[in-house]
Image (tube, grey):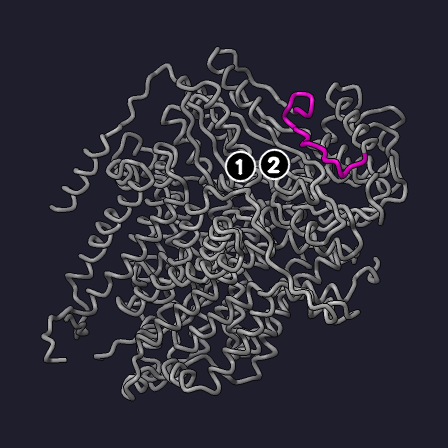
Amino acid sequence: MFKLEKRPQPSQAFAYLTPILAIVATMIAGGLLFMMLGKNPFESIRTIFWDPLFGEFAFYYRPQLLVKGGPLILIAIGLSLGFRAGIWNIGAEGQYIVGAICGAGVGLAFYPLEAWFIFPLMIIAGAFGGWVWAMIPALLKVRFQTNEILVSLMLVYVAEQLLASMSLGLLKNPDGHGFPGSRNLKDYPSAFNDEVITGSGMHWGVVAAFIAVIFAYILLNRHMLGFSIRLTGEAPRAARFASVNPTRLILFCLGMSGALAGLAGLFEVAGPAGQISIDFNTGYGFTAIIVAFLGRLHPVGILFAGLLMALTYIGGEIAQANLGLPAAAIQLFQGMLLFFLLAVDLLTNYRIKRISKEAV
Amino acid sequence: MDLSAINPALLLASLLVAATPILLAGIGELVVERAGVLNLGVEGMMITGAICGFMATIVTGTPLLGFIFAALGGAGLAFLFALLTQYTLANQVASGLALTLFGLGLSSLLGQDYVGLKPPSTPQLDIPVLSDLPFLGTVLFSHDLMVYFGIGLVAAVWAVLKYTRAGLVLRAVGENHEAAHALGYKVVRIRVLAILFGGACAGLGGAYISLVRVPQWTEGMTAGAGWIALALVVFASWKPWRVLLGAWLFGGVTVLQLNFQAAGVAIPVEYLSMSPYIITIVVLVIMSADKSRAPASLGRIFHASS
Amino acid sequence: MKFTKLLATAAVALGVATSAFADDKTKVGFVYVGPVGDGGWTYEHNKGRLAVEAEFGDKVETVYVENVPEGADAERVMTQMALQGADLIFTTSFGYMDPTINVAKKFPNVKFEHATGYKTAENVSVYSARFYEGRAIQGHIAGNMTESNIIGYIGSFPIPEVIRGINSAFIHARKVNPDVQFKIVWAYTWFDPAKEADAAKVLIEQGADVILQHTDSTAPLAAAAAAGNVIGFGQASDMAEFKDGPRVSSIIDDWAPYYIARTKAVMDGTWATKSTWDGIGAGMVGIGDITDKVPASVKAEALALKDALASGEYHAFTGPINKQDGSPWLAEGETADDGTLAGMNFYVEGLEGDIPQ
């Protein structure tokens, strides 16, 4: 018989060891899956994990990791603040969309004027759009105690309709021959979110993601507000005695996560995506929730988790094209990776003890 | 604009059908949450149920067997969630989301050879006198069996939760798992059973889409119904009959907006398409006057030795 | 370590079939917006890919990536295919237009083919199908067969492609039946079978006895089957499984001839940029078998119309046609030019309601 015993302190060693353990377990299980699909498991795993980093074309894929991981990290950092305090913003996808619409809208309003202030204004508008969209569940929660999970989730669907309407109406490219979608911001230098260093994949959104990681780290470890957040999540009753103001906390956490999601949307639409279109959103807002948890809600953890997620996406695409693995197999593989990462977390917080039958 | 084109009897009838998948999944999730577990993987379990049911129906030719396999498939996926959250004590929100990802992938893999097939039709209820009643016959007595099964399930869940000892224990586990444990209830076992029940219901809901409402198999065909089912449970403030009400409301608004469009009502389409979601939020605010709250242990991890 | 050993054993067991690409093989890449199992748009493109493989056998290698979101992801997938040595890449969604152009700039030696767009370059061609020709035939059959004089139309998004289809079907339905009315429902989604089913049911409940659809699932046909006396048409694929039920004909996207021709052109070194907009004549738009539910005379007319469209002797938009507000668009005998058709954003006279903007 085995018995779980809670560790008095989470194990430091296991906190570092478990992700590796999980990845190894995923490679074995995934390898078996790929073998069942008639592919060479060794080659499949290598294609997903090794090729993007060290393969022949790694010079191209490494920057792409930042492009794909940047928005995930930026959104997940914002979400993690709320999650720590027990405030569940599930609707980052909607805030991402609205941020993109507002930011792109401001940029397009100035077209074809070229000026230095346009891009900064777009950034403000993007953050503001996401913030407003997140304030709806926040204010409803503060005023009416409505559930923020549900409201923020419903607002994702509303935002998707809004996006479609914008691509077909207000923001439609006047020179687009009637086709849906806005002008491409890549062709509008003042509004284009270009790479900071050419060929590095580092556009301003990635920079913002790194700043957010540092900011969140300092906030959580050095600042009173960060302490309030942690206390509310870990010991709600103690937080009340420490006179933490829950209303302020809700407004801050939801507002912050909304603003960051909005920023991610703006940087995406002004950079890698280039335009507002009906299918502009690709699920970053939902994937970021997983990233936040994989990173154990810790800023540095989220940084690595975001990059790992990006790796499986990019590696997965290579595996599809080169080995003919169906996209579904990659999805399944990602699911497995998450399962294992979540499951091995057990070892960090608990130890397994062997006990004899009589002792039960 | 010609509102007379909208036939209220047919509107109500199609409302019942549109509500059934989310109703089934929602009532299952309600039981899970009443046991103190938050499973966000409903979408994954629904789509797995949709393909399992579809495959079984094509292979056996019997929709009834299809639905049984759909329930098994949904429960099978839910068992993974139970393993993660109840035995390895993983975070429920993240596990649920991972389950959705996994379920979507699994269903597409399983369904590769089933695209473009047409399943045998599910039998309709046809009661000689009742089904021919002028208004009620159309609204109430002309559906397939799953519509009635869904409503019956709501009644059963309500009765079990309210009047039976099993229901009492389930609620106790959801409200305060430490106390329930101290009283000698097997918290983990009860929760695993609840999770399996939730998975089976979600599977049935998914199969209803692939076997009756559409009916065909295409990847990702549940298209977000699982998330709506989750919303329903919160909307219903964890009360079974309100899940039914919520499902009808949501199904009703969806069908009504299409009716308005077809009748040429001059409201912009995008706002009509948004309306089910906005109305859900509005109703939620109105219902916030009701102070019933979530099960106290919802989403919290239980470990016996702590 | 045990695990490496396991993997190594497995690798040996399978034989490390690493890629020894022969250089004379032409490599063709396909970027899909949906899953190959969607039973509609992507499914048909993938059938085209398989046709290329069947045609050239060992001489080609095809690769594809499915479910590729538009934007940055699409650019990465195309770049990756180009890096891996693809000679020809088909990008099969309108939203891939700008990414295709961007990637094409970086790989001047790789040929790109973008579906349904309008931007070309030295190494980028565009291709699309004149589905509206098929719609004309559908409209003809629908106008003849409706008894309630109400035809339901399920649109996805109000974009030129869909609006063109509605206009074409309407013009030809009115020609044979001046009393016919169209009821149009916009689903505002490309893909949600349950919503499509609901939309079809609503239209039938409001009196439509013919359902035309511009969404790809069979859900509307199933709804028509359930309702009884309602007919519908297959969309994107033949949907022949509904033949003994409501499906009286279909529009089939047949990309195979084009894909084969373009691959051949790359092999022969004759590939050049062009804008292709093919219809029934070139075989890009197929009309599925018209069933016996359709009266023989109507069927004969429909087939005659098909032949006239195919030979180019008749254009689906031939004047006199007025716009919805009554202002003249095409004079007697005048035919629509491709530019107007490509960006069509108005209804023709007789259609009711506004196009959502």
Mark 2, residue position: C237
Q: Residue B114, position in %: x, y?
A: 49, 44
| Among the 4 quarters of the image, the one containing residue C308 | top right
Q: Residue C228, position in %: x, y?
A: 73, 52
Q: Which segment is the magenta one?
A: C278-295
Residue B96 versus residue C275 in the image, above or below: below
Seen from the viewer's position, the closer of residues B93 and B107 is B107
Q: Tell me what residue is drawn at x 48 percent, y 49 percent.
A: B59
| Among the 4 quarters of the image, the one containing residue B129 | bottom right
Amino acid type of the residue that numbered disc 2 sits on in the rendered structure? Ser
Residue C282 included in the magenta stretch of the image: yes
Residue B103 versus residue C263 in the image, above or below: below
> What is the secondary structure assignment of the residue under circle 2?
loop
Which label was assigned to residue C43? 1
Residue C145 included in the magenta stretch of the image: no
The majority secondary structure of the magenta stretch comes to loop
Q: Earlier in the sequence, mark 2 or mark 1?
A: 1
Seen from the viewer's position, the closer of residues C174 and B292 is C174
> What is the secondary structure assignment of the residue under circle 1?
helix
* Chain designation of label 2: C
Left or right of residue B14: residue C308: right
Q: Tell me what residue is drawn at x 47 percent, y 48 percent.
A: A267
Q: Residues within 10 Å of mark 2 (few under 14, many from 20)?
A: many
Amino acid type of the residue that numbered disc 1 sits on in the rendered structure? Tyr
